[in-house]
Amino acid sequence: MSNEANLSGFQKDRYFSRAWAMLTQEKGWWKPVALCALASLVPIVGPLAVFGYCLEWARRAAWGSTEAPSRHVKVGQLIKSGWRGAVVFVGWNIVAAFVGGILGNLPWVGELLSFAWGVFMIFVGMLVMVAAVRATVYQNFKAGYRAPTLWQMGSHDPWGLLRVWLISLVAGVIVVVVALFLFVPAAIGSIGFFMDLGDYVSGGYGYYMTEAEEARLALEVVGYLFQQFGPAILITAVLALVSGVFVNLLSYCGVALWLRQFNVPAWGRDEDPLPEPVVPEAPAADVPVPPVAGMPTPLACPSCGAEVPSASRFCPNCGAPMRKDGGDGCAADAASGQENESDAAPDLRDDENSDDGIIEVTPVAAAPVEELPNEGDQEPSADENDPLA
C-alpha cells in the first residue's frame, strides 16, 4: 500500500490508509509492533504498557502530529496512560453490561431490545475508544466520563466511527481466515485417529479397561492432539498476538484522525463545550487548485532573475523596467525598446541643426523616483519648453 497520503488536517474518510501510512512511514516500523507483542506476555503491566503506547500515539495524532509511533518512550508513563485508559474502558463496559442486562430482562420485548442493544454496542464500543483517547489528551480519567460531550462528538459523525470500526473488523476476519487454513489440514489428518479411537471404545474394549489404562489412553489422546494441532495453535497464537497490537495501533490512530474534526488544539478545560467542528479537507491529489481571479502572477526579471509581481513596472531588486504588457522581458531590450521608444520620451534631436554640433540625445526610460521636498523647500515648477515635462 502506498504511503503517499496527506497526513495533515482532517478528512472524513481514508482513516485506514492514513493510519497505515503514519505507522509504516519509517524503516523498521515492524520492530515496535513486535516488541509490543512480546511485552503483552508480561502479566498485568505488559498489556497496560501496550495499551498506553497506543493511546499516547493517538493523543499526538489527535493534536495534528503526523509522526510514526515513538521509539523513545518511558515505560512508567506508558503504564500510567494504559491504567487511565483501562479505568475508562472498564467503567463504561460495566455500565453498558448493566443496561443490556436490564433491557434483556424486560417482559415480552426483552429479546428484541437485547438484540438491538447488542447492535448498538458497536457504536458504544467506538465511543469508549474515543473516551479513552480524550482521557489521555487531558491526562485525567474523568475526561473520559463526560457523557454529554462524548455523545455530542459521536452523534456529529457516527459514520466516521463506523469506518474506523471496519478496520478492526477486517483485521479480525483476516486472522480467522488464516487460522482456518492452519487448522483445517490438521483436522482432516486426524479423522482416521478419532475413527479408530471410537471403534476401540465402542467395541467393548473400553468397558474392560482399568483406571490405569484409561489414564494411559487419555494421555495418548492429549499427546496426539498436541502433536497434530500444536503447530497450528502456536502460529495462530503468535498471529493473534501480533495482529492484536497492529490492529489496536491502527484503530486508535483512526480514532485520533476522526477526533481532528473537533479541533483538539483549541480544546479548553475538560468541562468546556467543544469548539466548532473544522471543515474536512479534500485530498490534495484529487482536487486541483484553480487560479484565483484577480491575483497577480509573479514574473522573473530578465536582468537579475528576481521575482517581480505582474503589477510592478520596475524590478524592486535591480530597478530594471518591466514591460507594460505584463511580459517577462525588460522595456529596454531590443525588440520592445524600439516600439515603445516614442511612448517613453520624445526625441530631442533637431533635424535642422544636426550639423551645427548639437548633441543628439535619445533618453532611455528609467524608473521614476519620487523625492519628497524638505521642509521649507519649494517644489520647482515645470518648464513649459521642456519636452520631458
Image (tube, rainbow, N blue to C red):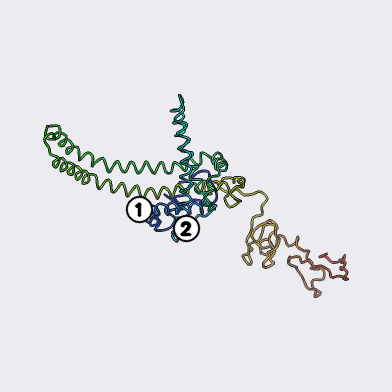
Q: Name which residue type carries label 2.
A: Gln
Q: Quadrant of residue 297?
A: bottom right
Q: Is residue 207 left or right of residue 319?
A: left
Q: Name which residue type carries label 1.
A: Leu
In the current view of this chain or complex, which residue is farthest to the bottom? Answer: 357
Q: Quadrant of residue 183?
A: top left
Disc 2, SS: helix
Name the spot of residue 34 as percent of width and height, x first: 37, 55
- 236 or 385: nearer the viewer: 236
Q: Is residue 57 left or right of residue 222?
A: right
- 290 or 121: nearer the viewer: 121
Label whose residue precedes the other's in the sequence (1 or 2): 1
Name the spot of residue 174 as percent of width and height, x first: 36, 43
Q: In the picture shown, does residue 216 fall above or below 316?
A: above
- 47 or 331: nearer the viewer: 47
Instruction: Name the residue tied to disc 2.
Output: 77
Name the spot of residue 234 as percent of width and height, x first: 28, 48
Instruction: Name the residue tied to disc 1.
Output: 41
Q: Residue at x 65, y 57 (%)?
A: 327
The span from disc 1 to disc 2 (Cα, nearest Å) is: 19 Å
Q: Is residue 246 left or right of residue 282?
A: left
